[in-house]
Image (cartoon, rainbow, N blue to C red):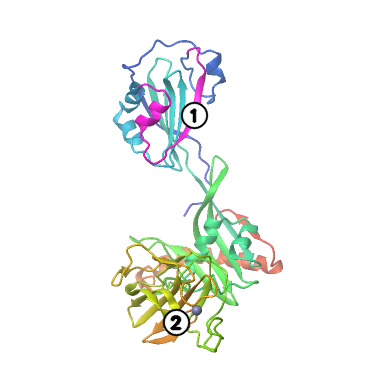
Amino acid sequence: MPDGIRVHRWIAVALVALSLAACGRAPSPPDAATAAAPAAAAPPIAATAAPIRETTRTVVPGDTLERIFRDEGLAPSELAALRADPDLRRRIDRIVPGDELRLRIDDGRLLAFERRLSATETLRAERAPDGSLRSELRVDPLEHSLRTTGAVIEGSLFQSADLAGISDTTAFKIAGIFRWDIDFVLDIRPGDRFDLTYETLSQDGVPVGDGELLAVQFINQGQTYRAVRWTPPGGTPDYFTPDGRSLRKAFLRAPLEFSRVSSRFNLYRRHPILNRMRAHRGVDYAAPIGTPVRAAGGGRVAFVGIKGGYGNVIEIVHPGGVRTVYGHLSRFSRGLRSGTVVEQGRVIGHVGMTGLATGPHLHYEYLQNGVHKDPQKVPLPKAEPVPARHMAAFRAHADPLLAGLDASVAAGRTAPAQTTASTGAL
Ligand SMILES: [Zn+2]
C-alpha cells in the first residue's frame, strides 16, 4: 500500500552510446529544420535539406521492425545500428500488435526512435551530434494516492459510479468482488449505496487511471457487504470480509454480465408461450443475443446440445450434488463438449432465444440433489478464510481501511445523493 502521495520525476536510468560504423556521417550544425522538429530538449541533430519527419506507427498483426523500417524509407543499416546493442535489441525486437513506435526520420536516416515499454518505462534512442545512436530508458513512476468516496445508486451501478467520478474499471471491480453475494443483474435497487477506498494513479501530475481497490462496502437492499483487499504472506491478493472470511464461493450469483431483467424466480408464473401455468424453475436473464454466459461454478459438462423447450442447453455437474442448467443459448463455446471440465467464470456459451423463448434471454437453473433451488437465495459453500496465525496482521491492515469506509458512509448520510470524497493516506 502506498504511503500517501509520492512525486517522482523522469529518471534516466541507463545511457548507452552506440557507435554507428555502418552509417556514420560527419556531424553538421543544427539548422532550421532541426529547430522545427518536436522534442525541444533533444540534442542538436544532423540534418539535410529534406524536411524532418516524425511518425507514429501502431504495430498491426504481421508487422516486423524490418517491414516498418522499410515502409518508412529507412535503410536496413539503420535497424542494424539500433540492434547493435544487445540490451537495446532485447527491448525492441519483440513487438506486438497495438505497440506504438515513434520515429523521427531525416531523408532515410533515423534521428530518433521511441517505444513505450510499459506504463512506466519508455525507451528512446536518439542520434547524437557525433552520428552515434544514444539510447536511454526513461522511468516515469506512477504516483499513487488514495481516494475514499461513496455514492447512492439511482440508475445503474455504472451510472452512479460515473457521477461519483469512479471509473468503469473500478466499478467492474466492485461487481467482481461481490459477485458471489450480490446478483448485479437482478438485485440492485435504487437507494443501494457503496463506499470504497482505492488508489488513483497519475504520472507527472496527469491522472492515468485507477490502481488497486483496497476496501469496499456495498449496502444492497439493506444488507451490508464489506471487503478488504489483503495479500496473505507468500500468497496472492484477495478480498476478505472484516472477520477474515473469503468473499469467494463455489457459485456465482449470476452466470452472466450485467443486463436487463425479464423475470425472477417464480414457481407459479404463466409461461408466455405455452400460455398455461407452468412452474418456472429458474431465473431468466434478459440480455442481448451474444452476451457471454459463464459457468456459475467449477464442474464437468454433463450435456451440450438441443433439448425441447430449452433449445440449445448446457448442463454442468458440480461437487456436492449441484447441477446448473443454461438454456436458450445462441451458441456454445468452441470445444465445449460433454465431459469438459470447466472452472468457475469460464465462458461456456452465448445468450440466444432458441427453444421456447419469447425474446433473447438466459434461462438459468440451480439444482441441489435434483431439486430446483432459487439460485439467488441458495446458501453457497465458502472458500478458505484468513488463517488464524495471520489474523492479527490482517486486522492491522483492514481496520484503518474499514474506519475510512465508516467515515465515508457517515459523511454520505447527511447528503445521500452526493459524493463524499477525500484524497490522501488513511
Ligand atoms: Zn426461463
Residue positioned 46% across, 22% down in the render:
105
Q: Is mark 2 within 8 Å of ligand 1?
A: no
Q: Which residues are magenta?
A: 48-75
What percent of the width, then of the height, locates residue 46? 46, 15
Q: Which residue is mark 2?
A: 379
Q: Is residue 411 left or right of residue 13?
A: right
Identity, as a three-letter code, of the amino acid under mark 2:
Pro
Residue positioned 54% across, 39% down in the render:
204
Res 311 → quadrant: bottom left
Question: Label 1: few (<14), some or many (≥20) within 10 Å?
Answer: few
**Residue 354 to residue 163: above or below:** below
Identity, as a three-letter code, of the amino acid under mark 1:
Thr
Q: Is residue 68 found inside the magenta-colored segment of the image?
A: yes
What percent of the width, then of the height, locates residue 150? 61, 63
What percent of the width, then of the height, locates residue 264? 55, 80
Which quarter of the figure is the C terminus placed in?
bottom right
Q: Is residue 49 found inside the magenta-colored segment of the image?
A: yes
- Is residue 61 or residue 199 the one in the foreground? 61
The reply to whether discs 1 and 2 touch (Cβ–Cβ < 8 Å) is: no
Q: Which residue is mark 1?
A: 55
Residue positioned 66% across, 65% down in the render:
411
Task: Report how far apart the C-alphas of labels 1 and 2 lie in the structure.
Answer: 58 Å
- Is residue 17 or residue 68 the one in the foreground? 68
Question: Label 2: few (<14), some or many (≥20) within 10 Å?
Answer: few
